[in-house]
Amino acid sequence: MSARVKFVNDLEELKQYIYDMSQLLSERFDSLVNVLENNDRALAKELIERDVDINELEVKINDQSVSLITSQSPVASDLRLIISCIKIAEDLERIGDNISNIAEVSRRTQIMNKQILLRLTTMIRLAKLMLDDAMVAMKTEDLSLVNEIIERDNDIDQIFVQVTMSDIYEETDAFVTGQIQLTAKYLERIGDHIENIGEHIFFTLTGKRYK
Amino acid sequence: MIMTKEKTSAIHIDNKNLNHSPMEMQNKEIFTSKNFNLWYGDNHALKNINLSFHENEISAIIGPSGCGKSTYIKSLNRMVELVPIVRTEGEILYRDTNILDKNMTVEELRTKVGMVFQKPNPFPKSIYDNVAYGPRIHGIKDKKTLDQVVEKSLRQAAIWDEVKDRLNDNAYGLSGGQQQRICIARTLAVEPDIVLMDEPTSALDPISTIKIEDLMQELKKEYSIIIVTHNMQQAARVSDKTAFFYQGNVIEYNDTNIIFENPHDKRTEDYVTGRFG
């Protein structure tokens, strides 16, 4: 269809900002695994400093959304997409904050316990896969994939419970224990944000709230 | 554009089934079309229209040019009969009476079904005489009664305060927005049941448009309003229900928020999002 060419292009651009933001975060998940496994404090510092890139993209998405609402009076699926982009951008920005928080933890302490480290890095990898798949679902408008992503947050939650509730890891240092629990909590929150993103995509595609 | 993949629930009207809508808590039906068809000569302009309008509601009719929406609204007060080559089939029930029945006179019908047009069309008379015109035709001669009717109608049309000191001035001296409200007052003066509005604000500036829209919200407490509009934002702002016409068919008729937030038919979605080429 040829109508509203500029508007359609602007909506595509808006979506592209979301994909760009997710791509940056996806790369940061990889870096975060490196930070934890190799105690790479320089990389941790870089992650913290580069959080500003994520924040700038969120501002860009918000500005573009406000401009489109003002100038184009969007309705129906167009309006849902714009509102969802604003909300997805907020969740992505919060994921970025949590990655920075974990990087901060890594600068304060080194997690030596292999079992715990394995679980934390598994949480990061699961989150990365969830986010990557969420973007695939958004691009391909794949509702069944959206449903699956939302369910997959349970996997991250289960590991979170293992890390925080289990007494099999005999960590004697209270400070390190606290930092481990913080890290696990940040990752659990990241999972929740990606679940939210799945719900926003569900709303965009169906016009209904995910239940 | 992201399209829902769940668009399966059939609010789409097949023009056969009257109980097509999931709308609940309906007010009493005031106008009902049953298998209504209309031809201009060989041109089949309205095809099997089945629609119900309800008391104290504003219903909007939207659709691209030539979709039949003006033809349809003009059928509701039989103005469409002014076109000599028009032929109709089916029924349009106004409170259980078929208005297409030859026993129904247009005078009787138009007393109950008032109409406001796209361009303000006051008579070249004073403001007072414009509004008093209908009641006088209906035989009201008593000056005091007429004064009351004129004041009440002008108040209902939210223009009394602007014209009360110059009721004997010619209505042509008013602004377009004021003239349109005089026309609304003139319509209300004969105490209709329903007010039809065919693009009532398309010739008006934004402030006058907002005044008319506010007025519609007031009027629906006492009247039922059916409005044809090209302005989809207006339909979204003012109406309770919206019917989407396309190529002489009713594609979708539903609560206005559904039509503009999550329509069930892809053609409605494409139209309200401006994707029609």
Image (cartoon, rainbow, N blue to C red):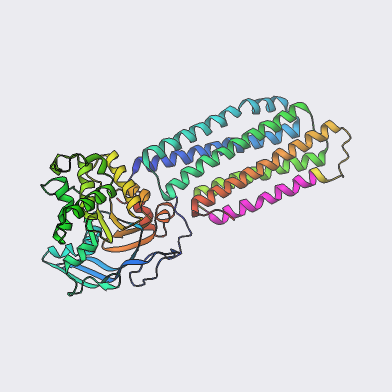
Q: Is residue B107 visible?
A: yes
Q: Position of residue B212 (x, y in %)?
A: 29, 46
- Quadrant of residue B14 within the rendered picture: bottom left
Q: Magenta residues? A: A142-163
Asked if residue A60 lies left or right of residue B141, the reply is: right
Which of A21/B199 is in front? B199
Asked if residue A92 lies left or right of residue B247, the reply is: right
Which of B144/B103 is in front? B144
Q: Position of residue A147 (x, y in %)?
A: 59, 55
* Residue A165 position (above or below residue A174): below
- Residue A109 on the magenta span: no
Question: Quadrant location of the C terminus of chain A?
Answer: bottom right
Q: Position of residue A210 (x, y in %)?
A: 57, 54
| Residue at 38 percent of width and 43 percent of height | A73
Q: Position of residue A168 (x, y in %)?
A: 87, 45
State whether the magenta stretch is mostly helix, strand or loop: helix
| Residue at 21 percent of width and 62 percent of height | B111
- Quadrant of residue A23 within the rendered picture: top right
Count of numbered marks: 0
